[in-house]
Image: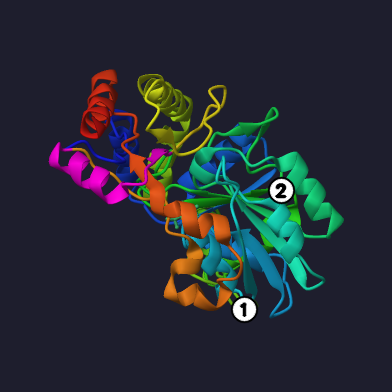
Amino acid sequence: MIRLFQPNLGDQELEAIQKTFSKSWIGLGEEVSNFEREFKEYIGSSYALALNSGSAALQLAIESFGFKKGKKVLVNNLTFIASATCILHNNLEPVLIDCNEDDLGINLEDAEKKVDKNTVALIVVHYAGHPAPMDKIMKFANQYNLKVIEDCAHCVGGIYKDKFLGTWGDIGCFSFEEKKGMTSGDGGMMVSNNENLIEKMRPNRWLGIDKDTWKRNSSYTSLGDLDTLHWHYEVSDLGFKYNMNDLSASIARVQLRRLKEFNSKRTYLVKLYLSYLENVDFIKPLINYDLNYPAYWIFGIRSFERDKVIRQLKSKGISTGVHYMPVSKHPLFRTYDINLPISTKIWKQFITLPLHTKLEEKDIRYVCQTLISYSD
Ligand SMILES: *Cc1c(COP(=O)(O)O)cnc(C)c1O
């Protein structure tokens, strides 16, 4: 079976875990701080906070602004459910925005229609890894005084107009879940150039405790018996248990060093898909892939016979997926299903095909030949 997604984990990751094991410190500690430093340097952001998931990053990102209950937040309708549940978790009102026909990204015309005086923020998802036009989005946001959170779960390492995605908006959120562009098992990151937004949330990733265990332990060791307050902490804000741990961070640090290699492999595979399918007029790519873009995470096609194609590929050992059923189709979001004609129609054509760094040219050829022969 050709898998849809597959992490790329090797000896380097194993060695990193082993080192962490030998320190016997696998919780929140030095590895997490090191990963935060390396990640923010990599994407060119001033502050970073490592968490145990991308969902946690989105939730804390919204919380960091301290919006009043009941205010509205715009978000793509076509996305993973976590892009929208973070709004409900903060007692705010999601406003689902339709997609563009071509790149499936957030539709600014629809956003323009739905924004009002109670709207406080916009969550923009870089769908499939394809960059949303952040210059236009920031202009729109500034015009309506909206905070911008970039959901970069699909586009780690992605760049738009010479600037890393995640650094255009007020806050960028990343996921290192096992299927994503790089992984730490599970994990997430929140980045910003605004120190206040990140540092205000640092205690909240650990139940509101304002000094982490590592700091307490190291100050205890250096001060020895003189320090009788090493155990002391006081909680003033209601927090969560959302911290990343050293075991995850040690994997993530290696994956970050390999990220460019991962992204260029996926880009190469997307190019192969496009070239094999180029002259097949009955198969349309999922989006208008830009061959100069370095960080695609989903490759897919659109088909009016989705289920037949899925069944055919499965019988030939090829896994497929559908990314995504729109948020508005989930029972939890039924009351927010308002005027979303494009996404609620075209999602039924989506078929995601295998894309991961372990695939080779022959695999892509096999998937494409299977697709083409079926339609003959
Ligand atoms: C994966 C994903 C998330 C959530 O990340 P987790 O690490 O799984 O919590 C958020 N948004 C999008 C668009 C995703 O694909």
- The 10 Å Cα crowd at callout 2, few under 14, some 14 to 19, many 20 or more, is many
| The magenta stretch spans residue 309 | yes
Q: Residue at x 57, y 73 (%)?
A: 336
Q: Nearer the viewer, residue 268 or 101?
A: 101
What span is colored magenta in the figure?
Answer: 298-317
User: Mark 1 falls on what kind of element?
Assistant: loop
Look at the picture and state if 373 lies above or below 66.
Answer: above
Q: Residue at x 44, y 34 (%)?
A: 285
Are the residues tagged 1 and 2 within 8 Å (C-beta)? no
Question: Quadrant location of the N terminus?
Answer: top left
Q: Nearer the viewer, residue 352 or 348?
A: 348
Quarter of the image where one finds residue 299: top left
Q: Residues within 10 Å of mark 1 (few under 14, many from 20)?
A: some
Query: In this rendering, would 121 be left or right of 50?
Result: right
Give coordinates of residue 332: x percent, y percent: 46, 76
Is residue 334 visible in the rendered image? The answer is yes
Q: Is mark 2 within 8 Å of ligand 1?
A: no
N-terminal label among 1 and 2: 1
Q: Looking at the picture, how far across and down is residue 327, in whole percent?
A: 49, 64
Q: Which residue is mark 1?
A: 91
The image's colour scheme reads rainbow
Residue 169 disc label: 2
Q: Residue at x 51, y 42 (%)?
A: 35
> Residue at image x 55%, y 71%?
337
* Furthest-right residue in this view: 143
Q: Is residue 275 above or below residue 123?
A: above
Q: Is residue 179 toward the left or the right of residue 367 in the image? A: right
In the depicted view, which residue is nearer to us: 92 or 312? 312
Residue type (three-letter) at the residue carrying disc 2: Gly
- Quick one: which residue is furthest to the front in this view? 376
Q: Amino acid at mark 1?
A: Asn
Q: CA distance from mark 1 to mark 2?
A: 22 Å
